Image (spheres, rainbow, N blue to C red):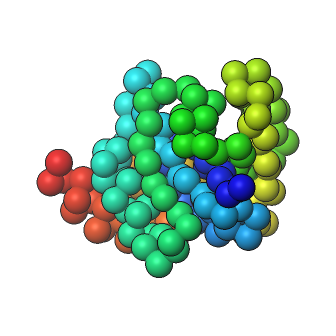
């Protein structure tokens, strides 16, 4: 049986920390599906379609990585994909407290799902999407924190 993991998140933007979790996840799973969740209550900083395209380019050489968008509960999306694992990265204990509750609810909704937590690599732990958005919003250079060029992303984003 193929071991499929769904790596869910808003990925606004997708960071080097996220990339690290995916690459390390590939050592554990046959396929990692990066699921960009559409949260109707949040206004995205970068367009969903643009982020999907940038993540796909990032993993173009990885045949076992797939990128999707979804607008449903994560547990339901995992079941539809045949994924029996959720992959999550933890930077600190605050992340653990938050993710622990979510993993319990996902298990309630989809009994076969197991959440696998990977501890973020130390050099990447301080990076968060919200910090990157704030830096970018105020004109700071953030490409060192991303696995793609933000200038390319900005160019695509402005065409939408």
x then y, percent, for residue 38: 43, 33
Q: Quadrant of the N terminus?
A: bottom right
Tally the numbered discs. Answer: 0
Q: Is residue 113 visible?
A: yes
| 76 relative to 16, above or below | above
Identity of the residue drawn at 34% across and 59% down: 53
- Left or right of residue 6: residue 36: left
| 61 relative to 128, above or below | below
Identity of the residue drawn at 76% across and 64% down: 28
x then y, percent, for residue 25: 70, 62
- Left or right of residue 71: residue 5: right
Q: Is residue 91 visible?
A: no
Identity of the residue drawn at 38% across and 31% down: 43
x then y, percent, for residue 123: 73, 69
Q: Nearer the viewer, residue 70 or 138?
A: 70
x then y, percent, for residue 81: 55, 43
- Left or right of residue 71: residue 104: right
Looking at this view, name the residue that lies furthest to the bottom.
61
Q: Nearer the viewer, residue 13 or 69?
A: 69
């Amino acid at each position: 049986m193929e071991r499929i993991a769904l790596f869910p998140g808003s990925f606004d933007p997708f960071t080097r920390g996220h990339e690290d979790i995916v690459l390390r996840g590939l050592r554990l799973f046959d396929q990692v599906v990066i699921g960009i969740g559409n949260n109707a209550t949040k206004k995205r900083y970068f367009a969903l379609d643009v982020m999907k395209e940038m993540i796909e380019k990032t993993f173009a050489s990885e045949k076992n990585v797939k990128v999707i968008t979804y607008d449903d509960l994560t547990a339901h999306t995992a079941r539809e994909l045949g994924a029996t694992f959720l992959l999550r990265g933890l930077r600190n204990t605050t992340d653990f407290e938050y993710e622990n509750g979510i993993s319990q609810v996902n298990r309630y909704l989809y009994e076969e799902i197991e959440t696998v937590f990977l501890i973020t690599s130390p050099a990447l732990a301080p990076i968060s999407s919200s910090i990157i958005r704030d830096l970018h919003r105020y004109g700071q250079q953030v490409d060192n924190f991303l696995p793609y060029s933000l200038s390319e992303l900005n160019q695509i984003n402005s065409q939408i």
